Amino acid sequence: MPPYSLADPPVLAFLVLPAAIAGLFVWGTAAAWRRTGQAASSGGAAVRAAAGALIWMGVTLALADRGTFTNWNATPPPFALLVVAIIALGVTIAFSPVGARLAHLPLWTLVAVQAFRLPLEIAMHALVSRGIMPEQMSYTGRNFDVLTGASAVIVAVLVAARVGGRRLVTAWNVGGLILLVNIVVVAILSTPKFAAFGPDRLNVFVFYPPFVWLPAVLVLAALAGHLIVFRALALIACLLLFVAPASAQRADTTAPRFEVASIKEIQHDDPRRLLCGLPPVERSGNRVHIFLAQLCGLIRVAYDVGEFQVTGIPANRGVGAANYFEIEALVENGGAPGVDGVRPMLRTLLAERFQLQVRREPVEMPVFVLVQESGRKATAPCPDLRRGSGYGAGRIVSCTPPLPMARFAQFLSNATGRMVVDKSGLEPFSFELRWQPDSAEPQPDSPPTLFTAIREQLGLRLEPRRAPVDSLVVTHVERLSAN
């Protein structure tokens, strides 16, 4: 092993890159805890991640400093045990609860992390010119891992811009994992145990500090990273790349669907348009008509969610806020389903015509909690109990039958643009709530704002808090296909 200096940039890279990866692991753990609705415990999770990383890095560095891994006469050799431990630890992290939470991070970030392999390969190539590392382990030899690092940047940008989808990430991830396995095999065959490339081209530099962190930290991070991307893609193994889509298509044939359905894009240029307006669903006999609807609004109807619960719709693919659609459909057997009966049929239609794919995940966000106002009682009863219950602009009526409090909270969610959680403890009661919508022009006799009206008319109040909200993330969508 030739002499080397930690001040030499390519040698220093084997201190800086592992430290950066450990820092990213700690940051990612905290971010994943927050993203999955566990913000309160994210600090503790980050501390545990930091402690685990420091212990692992410290132990491997100390063993390398003692020359433990240079002993190839032991059975089994200590370095072989290290390789087994690295693989086992990588798989364990990826398929542990920690890996499950990390898989909820944005897909582009999981891809972008692998870009560390680009500067790593540059540093490894510089070690060849210094006689520290054998050439077969660099990109001028048999190591092509530099392609993964360079392409990670490109794929991450495409995914973040919603130009690249799951198929691109899956293909890239499979390729990157294959290249990782390739260099690991080359490295093992280059050890003194095998000397497959000749006695003058041995891989011994990884037995010494700080180069031991190449397998112990960087290879570990690359392996766990690829497996976590598979989890994020809802794939268990590479074979599911082709099995999963086929299974999904077979499952779709049994999904509820309209007997006949037509979707067409319509021109509508209204500067007052909402970003995610909820379209009315008109039903007459077995006919269903949805007019002047954005894709986001159709998703809200199909999945029964609020505007604040839908994310990930691109604005540049003919499906954004400027694009409106009309749906005419017939329900088979002459049925006349309610909106709840239309929802699963609409989900099937969107999947077929827009290639829509979504996933649900909890996202921590601001919410309102509906509680009773101390010392106040409802003062706005329903004026006519013969009337029904419903929701309109600036008005919620609870008459016959009285609105369930959960439904009332859902109406308030639509009005406030935030999730409203009912913690009032009240049974359904009759009332008429009237307030001044933000979009309406104030008049001298206008009712109060929503927050004031709830307090004065119903004896309730909305408290702002933060909580995990079940959200719908659009992972793939395409332009409307022909009827």
Image (cartoon, grey):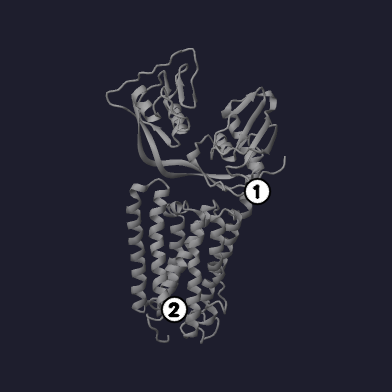
Task: Please identify the quadrant where the N terminus is shown.
Answer: bottom left
Say which residue appears at 31% left-offset and 27% top-offset.
373
Label 1 – label 2 distance at C-alpha: 47 Å
- Label 2: how many Cα within 10 Å (few below 14, some 14–19, many 20+): many
Q: Which callout, 1 or 2, points at the residue further toward the start of the chain?
A: 2
SS at mark 1 in the image: helix
Q: Amino acid at mark 1?
A: Ala
Looking at the image, which is closer to me, 285 or 432? 432
Say which residue appears at 35% left-offset and 18% top-offset.
379
Q: Position of residue 199 (x, y in %)?
A: 51, 86
Q: Position of residue 43 (x, y in %)?
A: 33, 53
Above/below status of 341 relative to 217: above
Q: What number is the disc on residue 449?
A: none
Looking at the image, which is closer to me, 339 or 73? 339
- The residue carrying mark 2 is 10
Looking at the image, which is closer to me, 185 or 367? 367
Q: Amino acid at mark 2?
A: Pro
- The residue carrying mark 1 is 246
Would you say 55 lies left or right of 112 here? Answer: left
Q: Position of residue 263 (x, y in %)?
A: 68, 37
Task: Please identify the quadrant where the C terminus is shown.
Answer: top right
Query: Which one is in front in this view, the residue at disc 1 or the one at disc 2?
Result: 2
